[in-house]
Structures are given as C-alpha cells and as structure tokens.
C-alpha cells in the first residue's frame, strides 16, 4: 500500500451543484478496492460547503500543482501579459527546492 495523490480538480467557472454528503458517499464508493491512501478535499466556492476524505492529511504533491500553474499561465497569456514565444533564460534564482531538473541545468540556458 502506498500514499500518492491521484489528481487535482479545480473548478474555475460555473461551479458545481453538489450535495457534500452524496459527494463523500460517491468518493467512498469509488475508492473501495483502491490499494493506496486516497485523499480528497473539495469546497463549493459559492456556498462554502465542504466534503472530503482525509482532507487534512498531507500528501506529497508530485506534479499535481502543475494544473493551477498552467491555468494561470493561459489566463496571463490571454490577457497579453505573457508571450508564449518568449524564451526564458535560466538563472540561479530559478533553482529552488522542488524545481526538479532545473537544479541540474546551467545558468543562462534557454528554456521555454
């Protein structure tokens, strides 16, 4: 048995109409037979309702954080704040804990 995030769902617009208890029941049903540790936490932004299973348990994020990052990238690109054709040159400031392979690359290297 292992502990690993399965994914991340971010509802950006439109919202969901859910009953937190039925959502929790549905998550429990889907998780039966899963050979691992499942953690889910959801909050309805309009109503403030919460539902979850192990919602306060800390899991390693792996690449889950990439979803909201790429969403924000596209928002800024649509707003004209970012140019997708612009090349970024790696600096030592880019090499922070959790930056993966970037720590191994040479400063000044072009990345896109």
Image (tube, rainbow, N blue to C red):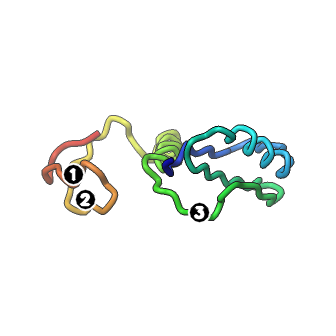
Q: Secondary structure at mark 2?
A: loop
Badge 2 crowding class, 10 Å Cα cut-off, few under 14, some 14 to 19, many 20 or more, is some
Q: Counting residues from the N terminus, which is met first, the one under dot 1 or under dot 2?
A: 1
Residue 6 at x, y = what percent? 55, 43
- Picture quarter containing residue 12? top right
Mark 1 touches mark 2? (CB < 8 Å): yes
User: Which residue is rendered at x = 27% and y = 58% of the image?
Assistant: 94
Q: Please give the residue where the numbered disc 1 appears in the rendered image.
A: 90
Q: Residues within 10 Å of mark 3 (few under 14, many from 20)?
A: few
Label 1, label 2: how far apart the Cα atoms are: 8 Å
Residue 65 placement, left or right of 20: left
> Helix, strand or loop at disc 3?
loop
Mark 1, residues whose alpha carbon is within 10 Å: few (<14), some, or many (≥20)?
some
The percent position of residue 87, horizontal first and vertical second, equals 26, 41
Q: Nearer the viewer, mark 1 or mark 2?
A: 2
Q: How far across and how far down the image is residue 37, in percent?
A: 57, 50
Q: What residue is at 71 percent from the left and 38 percent from the top?
A: 30
- What's the distance in space between the residues labelled 3 and 1, CA to CA? 34 Å
At x 21% / y 51%, what residue is drawn? 90
Secondary structure under tag 1 reads loop
Q: Tell us which disc is closer to us: 3 or 2.
A: 3
The foreground one among 38 and 96 is 38
Query: Is residue 75 found left or right of 101 in the rendered image?
Result: right
Residue at the limit of the structure toward the top, as seen here: 85
In the image, what residue occupies the spot 47% across and 43% down? 70
Is 89 drawn above or below residue 58 in the view shown? above
Which residue in the structure is indicated by mark 3?
57
Label 2 belongs to which residue?
Answer: 95
Q: Position of residue 110 (x, y in %)?
A: 19, 43
């Amino acid at each position: 048995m292992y502990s690993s995030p399965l994914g991340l769902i971010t509802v950006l617009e439109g919202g969901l109409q859910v009953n937190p208890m039925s959502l929790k029941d549905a998550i429990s049903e889907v998780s039966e037979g899963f050979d691992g540790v499942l953690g889910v936490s959801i909050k309805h932004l309009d109503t403030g309702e919460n539902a979850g299973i192990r919602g306060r348990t800390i899991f390693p994020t792996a690449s889950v954080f990439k979803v909201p990052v790429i969403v924000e990238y596209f928002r800024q690109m649509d707003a004209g704040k970012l140019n997708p054709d612009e090349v970024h040159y790696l600096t030592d400031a880019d090499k922070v804990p959790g930056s993966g392979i970037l720590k191994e690359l040479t400063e000044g290297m072009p990345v896109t």
